[in-house]
Amino acid sequence: MNKLKLAIVGCGAITQGIHLPVTALSNQVEVTVLVDKFLPRAHELADKYGVPVVADEYREIIGKADAAIVSLPNYLHAPVTIDLLQHEVHVLVEKPMALKTSNCDEMIEAASNTGAVLAVGLVRRFYGSSQFVKQIVENGLLGNILGFDLREGIIFRWAVASDSMFRKEAAGGGVLVDIGPHALDLLLWWLGGYTSVEYYDDAMGGVEADCELHLRLQCGASGVVELSRTRNLRNSWIIRGERGTLEVGTGFNPLIRLKTKNRDVVLAGRVARDGVADKTIQDVFRRQFDDFVDAILSHREPFVPGQEGRRAVELVETCYALRQPSKQPWMFLEGPRHGALESALP
Amino acid sequence: MRSTQFDLSGKRVLVTGGTGFIGGRLVERLVLEHKADVRVLVRNFARAPRIARFPIEMVQGDVTRPGDVERAVSGCEVVFHCAYGNQGNREMQRLVNVEGTRNVLAAALHARVKRVVYLSTLMVYGTTPDGDLDEVAPRRYSGNIYADSKLDAERIAFDYIEKHGLSVAILQPTAVYGPFAPVWAVDVLQRLKTEHVILVNGGDGLCNAVYIDDAVSAILLAAVKESAVGEAFLISGEQPVTWRDFYGGYARMLGTAEMVSVSAAELLKAHYAQKRRKTKGILRETLSILREDPLIRERLLRTPEVVLLTKAGRSLLPKPIRQSLKRRIGSNSRTSRPQVASEREKPLRPMSPPTVQFYAAKTRVRIGKAKRMLGYQPAFDLESGMRLTEQWARWANLL
Ligand SMILES: NC(=O)c1ccc[n+]([C@@H]2O[C@H](COP(=O)([O-])OP(=O)(O)OC[C@H]3O[C@@H](n4cnc5c(N)ncnc54)[C@H](OP(=O)(O)O)[C@@H]3O)[C@@H](O)[C@H]2O)c1
Ligand SMILES: NC(=O)c1ccc[n+]([C@@H]2O[C@H](COP(=O)([O-])OP(=O)(O)OC[C@H]3O[C@@H](n4cnc5c(N)ncnc54)[C@H](O)[C@@H]3O)[C@@H](O)[C@H]2O)c1
């Protein structure tokens, strides 16, 4: 069987750290093109992984690749993905799927018009722990869900190759559009749709470093999602049901604690699949990639298709539309001399 | 004085060290209050989330690379030089503090920058004596790499003023505390959580502290007042407070943290006794680095190895002193909250003679010059400064 020809578009931190090491190990694909507008980086990685073609323009992959991973700055996800899908190139697009719901719709439409596969890189759905939570909730082990609480934050240290993550026009926002797609996707996947949201963040003309969402869900549960790039937070989900409480870490292969109602009995442990736990985060990305390839080869929907990726984008978009400034009393000095806040807000 | 002051609004200004504590707050206020057009020299984008909340320009670069600095300075009317060597070995720190400052001043001269505000430190006066201290006090080397290299950098700044006529204003802040302060907030809280903090002489020594917003107000004044040029200004709060009150403020935030009073004499005795004892070379070396510089400690303290080392440090204290400390820790608990087991487990960290001296001194930093010539007036006392610091620390998940 001929190997699938794969292009990787965008050779930044995630491509170098994850996508290339993962795809290089696949025996179903061959990476044939690397694209980055900063050519030296693409060349360096091409040399390391033996990729024959390098380009600084994504359109050059058309005709040279059957499928592509799009890991460009956020604002380019939609236009590049749509163009590739229209040329029948299958696409795995990094999160966030797009910056606007309307773009998601165009992406979904382009895929359905040509039959190309559109998969969204919401990798946390492939965590064993995420699938375990989904099953616990779906099987009713916790009873009706009453509330949830997510505090996710670390003092930022992702080794970005450029400042695109901090430029509003390139990133589309800050921590909400960065971590939000992962976190909110899980919330909506596990617990179902939302009915209302209040949103607060600390952006003042740039991109937010910290934000907080107060959500009410269709299932009746309500709760808080807090995300941060400046603070080390608890880094876990707490999901409270009528019959018990589940706490699950946000990281890779996290500890899960299950506590039954009114009992001090706690079950704590890590999820394994057929007795084996994931060893590295690459294992999880490999499952995501294998799913994408299998969807292409067996002409089926990927595990996270465009319709699913769209949900978190919709919630992020709604949050920005309803934005209120966070209350940070240490930010603003009192008195008329220091009253410049209102006019400084976007 | 109003007539000899210019407006920062719409002016392009450069902040070095903008990803740090003081520079970060300066960026916020330059944007919010002055509507300045702010550019920041960023060494590592991963440290940029706080300033990226504002519509600013980020230029990637390192102060030790002249080309980077020239690019960043070009087109700016005012340069705020807040970067300093906060990591690496002695040579690296010296390189950033001394050569980095020289690069900034040279680029500013070349680009005809209208004003440079350089952040020096109280520590250029070396070990300060009891009593009043103002800007006429002699500068002295103290053997501390941070203080000595900052003194060399300050001398270069005076050189640029005198020989090249560059318009530089120099500020010498004392202990700057407040939200995001690495040394005087994060580190203090961390220490109170993980060890028994020793109060030298019961914390009677004087702490010249200044709340971050007062320090930043002084920086902003130094940028706009003509009278600032060619001068150095000590910047502190209105009055010194005791170290007991300063550490006590943080201990109260934590609720259960206990401190222990030890006299300077006992601490020095412990230090020399420990020096006489044979310890494995490498361990002793590490301990002495640890003790030497509170700025290095802040970074080191986060690693588990250091927790182990500080535990090892406790066993280096001579037994009688350890026991007497233990008694005092025990007796303290009657007046404070019930002691939790982990309180007893906390190690005591030995103190070097310069550190003992630093905490024992009753120096009163006078801020008359800054008041007179800059119109500086601190707006925060310890209580109001700590109130905001506490609100931030709670939010930052540090309490
Ligand atoms: N805090 C105090 O109590 C106090 C008291 C007196 C004087 N001062 C003076 O105030 C100034 C600011 O101190 P701080 O407390 O704000 O320190 P800080 O939080 O540690 O910030 C230091 C800044 O310098 C930057 N930096 C370090 N090396 C650099 C290099 N080679 N090139 C470019 N940037 C570099 C750091 O960048 P990264 O973010 O990449 O590390 C960071 O932005 C310093 O000059 C210090 O001497 C402080
Ligand atoms: N799934 C995850 O957990 C995860 C983790 C990190 C990043 N990401 C996503 O991956 C994407 C990339 O993130 P990163 O951290 O690698 O960013 P990065 O800034 O390190 O890399 C972006 C790369 O894109 C290149 N580029 C920019 N514009 C281009 C253009 N027009 N044509 C070709 N190349 C161009 C840049 O030169 C750079 O090499 C983002 O959308 C991010 O959200 C996902």
Image (spheres, coloured by chain):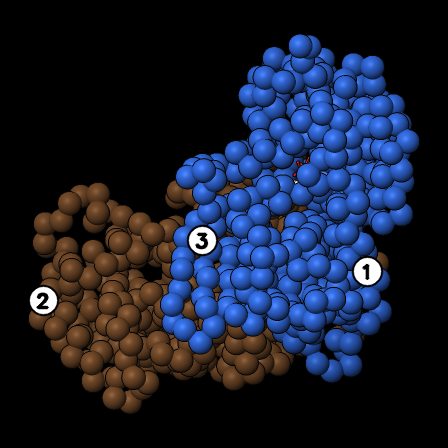
Chain colours: A blue, B brown
| Amino acid type of the residue that numbered disc 2 sits on in the rendered structure | Lys
At a point 61% along the width and 24% down the height, the residue shown is A23
Between B369 and A173, the one nearer to me in the picture: A173
Residue at the far front: name it.
A139
Residue highlighted by disc 1: A318
Q: Nearer the viewer, mark 2 or mark 3?
A: 3
Where residue A1 sits in the image (x, y, percent)? 67, 10
State whether residue B257 is above or below residue B22: below
Q: Quadrant of residue B308?
A: bottom left
Residue highlighted by disc 2: B319
Tell me the crowding category of disc 3: few under 14, some 14 to 19, or many 20 or more residues within 10 angstroms, Cα based: some
Residue highlighted by disc 3: A255
Question: What chain does mark 3 sit on?
Answer: A
The answer to which of marks 3 and 1 sits earlier in the sequence is 3
Between A47 and A262, the one nearer to me in the picture: A262
SS state under label 1: helix
* CA–CA distance in space, label 3 to label 1: 32 Å
Where residue A236 sits in the image (x, y, percent)? 53, 59
At a point 74% along the width and 60% down the height, the residue shown is A193
Where residue B27 sits in the image (x, y, percent)? 69, 59
Tell me the crowding category of disc 1: few under 14, some 14 to 19, or many 20 or more residues within 10 angstroms, Cα based: some
State whether residue A288 is above or below residue B260: above
SS state under label 2: helix
Question: What chain does mark 1 sit on?
Answer: A
At a point 56% along the width and 76% down the height, the residue shown is B391
* CA–CA distance in space, label 2 to label 3: 42 Å
| Amino acid type of the residue that numbered disc 1 sits on in the rendered structure | Thr
Direction from residue A276 to residue B40 in the image, left or right? right
Direction from residue B329 to residue B97 in the image, left or right? right
Does residue B212 appear anywhere in the picture? Answer: no
Q: Does label 3 point to a residue whose CB lies under 8 Å from ligand 2?
A: no
* CA–CA distance in space, label 1 to label 2: 64 Å
